[in-house]
Amino acid sequence: MDKPAARSRLPASVKQASAPRKARTKSAPDTAEKRPRGRPRKTLDERDDGNRRVELVNAAARLFRKKGFDATSTRDIAAAVGMHSGSPFYHFKSKAELLNAVMEEGMRSALQRQAAALQAAGLSTAEAPALLRVLIRNHFDVLLGPGSDFIPVMLYESRSITARQRGLLAKLQSDYEAVWEPVLEALAKAGQLKGPVKLSRLLIFGALNWSVQWFDVKKDASLDDLADAAMALFIGEKTPARKTRT
């Protein structure tokens, strides 16, 4: 059998040179301005410096109490704090969310003020009448004193928030009223509170809270006078007559 012809090999000197590789060139930096993602940068009015949110909540509380939730616009609230009409939405998703903040922060403030009043008084349940007066006087201050727009809004505008939000407010309200329970129980044991404790608590808060409907600080008695009258009504405790306003 004939051997196959050997393949001829080209000398190295005559090998076909491979095409030279192209040198890598660095791409020129992209100097085009990149498009910003998300929302545009906030203006100075829209940035929260720690006070803007508080200002919005305070202004909303005043307006909700004065005009009602439905009659108050976000534009009204923004104007009250010197903001652009859309700026409140950087802090709250909606007017309803702002309403909930008014109520929740109002209840948290009421809890803090009640705790501070009790601590300052330094009383125990053995001094139940004096302790009840501290609670009543502080509650009138929460309802009718300076910066007292929050709780009245909660009392009359809670239908405008969600069931979940009302549940949280109910928990805060329960924590606030729970402090009164042992005081009323001590008064009942001493024979000074005539009705059942639970019903008495509901009636007491109903009477105190209704004062936001009729009390006028410019015309009516002082908050101390109101506290004295409440003590006389609830447990028959008489206090020395105070000087009437002239």
Image: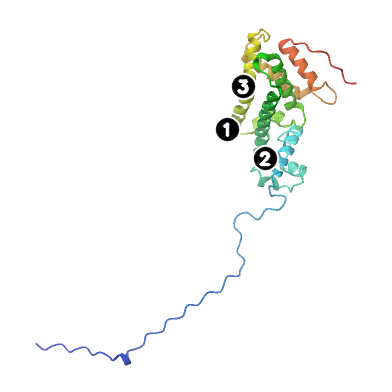
Q: Between disc 1 and disc 3, whose residue precedes?
A: 1
Q: Between disc 1 and disc 2, whose residue precedes?
A: 2
Q: Residue 121 occupies which quadrant of the picture? A: top right
Q: Which secondary structure, mark 2?
A: helix
In the picture of the structure, the residue carrying the numbered disc 2 is 95
- Amino acid found under the numbered disc labelled 3: Ala
Between label 2 and label 3, give the one nearer the viewer: 3
Q: Between disc 2 and disc 3, whose residue precedes?
A: 2
Residue 29 at what x, y percent from top left?
Answer: 57, 71
Marks 1/2 in contact by CB < 8 Å: the verdict is: no
- Amino acid found under the numbered disc labelled 1: Arg
Q: Residue 177 occupies which quadrant of the picture? A: top right
Q: Quadrant of the C terminus?
A: top right
In the picture of the structure, the residue carrying the numbered disc 3 is 178
Q: Which secondary structure, mark 3?
A: helix
Q: Which mark is residue 164?
A: 1
Q: Residues within 10 Å of mark 3 (few under 14, many from 20)?
A: few
Residue under the image location 69 percent in, 18 percent down: 131
- Amino acid found under the numbered disc labelled 2: Lys
Foreground pick, 243 / 73: 243
Determine the CA span between mark 1 and mark 2.
17 Å
Q: Which secondary structure, mark 1?
A: helix
Determine the CA span between mark 1 and mark 3.
21 Å
Q: Residue furthest front?
A: 122
